[in-house]
Image (cartoon, helix red, strand yellow):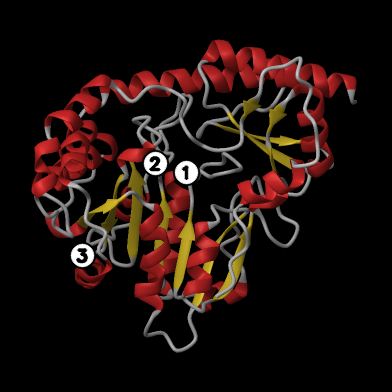
């Protein structure tokens, strides 16, 4: 297997011979890692349950976590799931990598489609699955929304969407997602939406593919799956708590597969994550912090209003040159768009992760604005 280096490895290589301006503090806006403290009640639950380290975790997760996650889905999206329609997972990165391998294993000539630019784990899973790939290119011309009318898409076995989208920040409406569900059912394709940014939005709550499935009358969630994670919403990426939910028939086989994978979630983490999934107050507090940052970006950089995620997909011309010069002049790291895309997707853009508090974010954005003015 041959995997491309991760975007952050490419960035380190790009910047290794550049000396940044030491007059400015070092700032990294490259990775989607929240810089807020994990809420105290989550930390306390982790400490208080440390004695459970002497227990083997179940591969499917404890009932309390499963129930808390299903409760979240009901409260947030109005969708009531059965226990058989959700599996607790060790975050979502592992699912996005190993589910395609499980699902595509018996396909003689597997075909996988996913949005481009993308979260690179999609590409990795396609490589590991020996799948032929169809890129769903996201461009300014199509408002960063995938084209459902690509003729070869009917041959796909698995389609991975990612809305709200990383890195372009675009969203799909209930009707648009419903169209994808109808397409998947018509052509017997499994459709998975990566919804890890569902709780990071400015004003309008993003909808779930599960909602869209019900909207078009697919009440059994046939061929429909979603993944979601606690990492962004709870400022707890190390908690590694996620889930995959939807089609119970598919999940039954995948659950059996997972007993061999060995991805059981440590018991103290499960106890802490059950509390985190059950509480929405801290999620709303965090959402408002990110909303402030998005508003600051609109005000200071003049970007269009961003509805969801904590990213800015900034059009800059030459993304490589911009990244290098900004680092040299202001000691600020951003991610070139081409590092998260293929076939030219992402070129001309940089991704900026607004993961600091609003005071720090405002100062950083003003430095970027000054740099852009100086280099116009």
Quarter of the figure with the N terminus: bottom right
Q: How many marks?
A: 3
Residue highlighted by disc 1: 173
In three-dimensional space, the C-alpha distance between marks 2 and 3, rounded to whole angstroms, equals: 21 Å
Residue highlighted by disc 3: 248
Q: Earlier in the sequence, mark 1 or mark 2?
A: 1
Disc 1 on helix, strand or loop? loop
Residue at 24 percent across and 26 percent down: it is 43
Q: How many residues crowd around disc 3 within 10 Å: few (fewer than 14), some, or many (20 or more)?
A: many
Report whether 371 appears left or right of 105: right
Give yes or no for contact between labels 1 and 2 (Cβ–Cβ under 8 Å).
Answer: yes
Q: Nearer the viewer, mark 1 or mark 3?
A: 3
Residue 71 in view in this figure: no
Disc 3 on helix, strand or loop? helix
Image coordinates of residue 164 in percent, x first then y, are 49, 42
Q: Nearer the viewer, residue 21 or 232?
A: 21
Residue highlighted by disc 2: 207
Q: Nearer the viewer, residue 321 or 301?
A: 321
Residue at 23 percent across and 35 percent down: it is 277
Image coordinates of residue 158 in percent, x first then y, are 44, 70
The residue sitting at the bottom extreme is 108
Image coordinates of residue 22 in percent, x first then y, are 75, 19
Residue at 60 percent across and 59 percent down: it is 147
Image coordinates of residue 69 in percent, x first then y, are 21, 43
Residue 284, above or below 233: above
Residue 50: which quarter of the image? top left
Q: How many residues crowd around disc 1 within 10 Å: few (fewer than 14), some, or many (20 or more)?
A: some
Q: Nearer the viewer, mark 2 or mark 3?
A: 3
Q: Earlier in the sequence, mark 2 or mark 3?
A: 2
In three-dimensional space, the C-alpha distance between marks 1 and 2, rounded to whole angstroms, equals: 7 Å
């Amino acid at each position: 297997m041959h995997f491309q280096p991760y975007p952050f490895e490419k960035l380190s290589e790009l910047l290794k011979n550049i000396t940044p301006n030491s007059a400015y503090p070092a700032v990294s806006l490259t990775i989607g890692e929240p810089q807020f403290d994990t809420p105290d009640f989550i930390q306390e639950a982790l400490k208080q349950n440390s004695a459970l380290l002497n227990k083997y975790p179940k591969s499917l997760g404890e009932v309390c976590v499963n129930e808390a996650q299903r409760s979240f889905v009901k409260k947030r999206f109005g969708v009531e799931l059965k226990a058989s329609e959700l599996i607790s997972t060790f975050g979502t990165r592992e699912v996005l990598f190993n589910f395609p391998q499980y699902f595509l294993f018996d396909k003689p000539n597997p075909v996988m489609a996913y949005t481009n630019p993308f979260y690179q784990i999609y590409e990795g899973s396609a490589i590991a699955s020996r799948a032929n790939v169809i890129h769903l290119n996201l461009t300014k011309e199509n408002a960063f929304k995938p084209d459902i009318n690509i003729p070869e898409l009917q041959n796909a076995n698995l389609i991975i969407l990612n809305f709200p989208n990383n890195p372009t920040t675009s969203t799909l409406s209930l009707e648009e997602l419903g169209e994808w569900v109808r397409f998947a059912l018509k052509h017997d394709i499994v459709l998975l939406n990566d919804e890890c940014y569902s709780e990071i939005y400015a004003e309008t709550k993003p909808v779930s593919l599960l909602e869209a499935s019900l909207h078009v009358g697919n009440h059994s969630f046939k061929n429909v799956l979603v993944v979601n994670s606690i990492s962004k919403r709870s400022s707890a990426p190390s908690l590694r708590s996620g889930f995959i939910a939807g089609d119970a028939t598919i999940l039954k086989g995948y659950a059996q597969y997972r007993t061999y994978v060995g991805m059981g979630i440590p018991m103290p983490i499960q106890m802490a994550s059950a509390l985190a999934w059950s509480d929405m107050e801290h999620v709303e507090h965090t959402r408002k912090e990110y909303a402030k940052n998005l508003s600051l970006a609109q005000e200071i950089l003049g970007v269009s209003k961003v509805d969801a995620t904590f990213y800015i997909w900034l059009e800059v011309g030459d993304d490589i040159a911009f990244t290098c010069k900004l680092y040299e002049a202001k000691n600020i790291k951003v991610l070139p768009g081409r590092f998260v895309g293929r076939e030219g997707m992402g070129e001309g853009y940089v991704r900026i992760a607004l993961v600091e508090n609003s005071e720090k974010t405002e100062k950083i954005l003003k430095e970027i604005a000054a740099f852009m003015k100086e280099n116009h």
